[in-house]
Image (cartoon, rainbow, N blue to C red):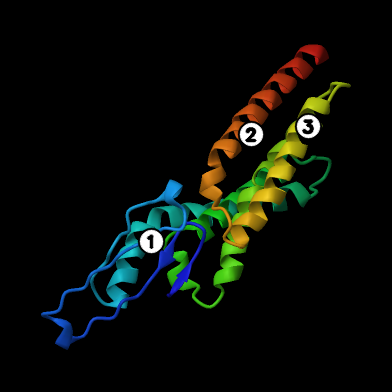
Amino acid sequence: NIGHTPVTRWLDIPFYEVDGKSTLIIRTYPVYHEVLLPPLFYLGTQRDVISYIMYQSFFPFVMAVNLIFLGMIALALCRAKTGKHKPTEGLDQLGILCIVAGFWRLTDLRISPLIFRNIQPVLSYFSLSMLFLLPVPVTRYVYSRIHLKVKWPLLLTIALYVVFDCITFPLQIFGIRDLRQSLVVLQFLAIGGGGLMLIMVLLSQVKMR
């Protein structure tokens, strides 16, 4: 068992020259039948397999690194004070969003367990943490842009999302229920929360005008 994340689990089965005429039968027993995915098999040396997976993951890897880099630039520009010029409103939240999304994508790649072999639990928990933190900067920015006295619908959405995180995260860590089994609830929260944010922002802009 080389390593795993919430998305990928790598198993290394060694072959030797004397095994050339042998037959290998692999049976998979999924823990979560609802999210059963067909396993992929790669035949070759470890170096060849890692090189091939790295080639497949090259574009997402570059995009994740660029997101982190752009997020750092946005935070630096937001903190910089040059004369009387003020930083663009919401630039700090955009920077945080880019950094969190970049780290989540970087640790979510299939190549990550092959590169970071000695920190598997940290890698898994860090990836989940970044995924759960993605809505935070968006929600903070939207909340600051709403000029309405009634903000309880948005606060209720935030509370529901926090409760979902507090339930899902321990279930994933202790192997009781996979995160992908709860994606339907997560999608409803994302669509409903995003639509509610959009409506409240539009109502706020109408009131301001």
Residue in the picture at 57% in, 54% down: 104
Category of crowding for the residue at label 3, using alpha-carbon neighbours closer than 10 angstroms: few (below 14), some (14–19), many (at least 20): few
Q: Are marks 2 and 3 in contact (CB under 8 Å)?
A: no
Pointer 3 with pointer 1, Cβ within 8 A: no
Check disc 2 and report the residue beneath it: 189
Left or right: 193 in relation to 80: left
Q: Secondary structure at mark 1?
A: loop
For this rendering, which residue is in front, 174 or 15?
Answer: 174
Q: Residue furthest bottom?
A: 18
Q: Earlier in the sequence, mark 2 or mark 3?
A: 3
Q: Amino acid at mark 2?
A: Leu
- Residue at 13% x, 81% y is 20
Who's the residue at 34% across and 70% down the image? 50
What numbered label is drawn on residue 208? none
Q: How far across and down, in percent of the image, does residue 205 sit?
A: 76, 17
Q: Amino acid at mark 3?
A: Leu
x then y, percent, for residue 140? 76, 39
Is tag 3's residue or tag 1's residue first in the polypeptide sequence?
A: 1
- Measured as percent of width and height from the top left, residue 111 is found at 42, 64
Q: CA distance from mark 3 to mark 1?
A: 40 Å
Whole-percent x, y for residue 91 in the image: 71, 41
**Mark 2 / mark 1, whichever is N-terminal:** 1
Closest to the camera, between mark 3 and mark 1, is 1
Disc 1 marks a residue whose amino acid type is Tyr
Q: CA distance from mark 2 to mark 1?
A: 31 Å
| Cα separation between marks 2 and 3 | 11 Å
Q: Which mark is residue 156?
A: 3
Question: What residue would you read off at disc 1?
Answer: 29
Residue 150 sits in quarter: top right
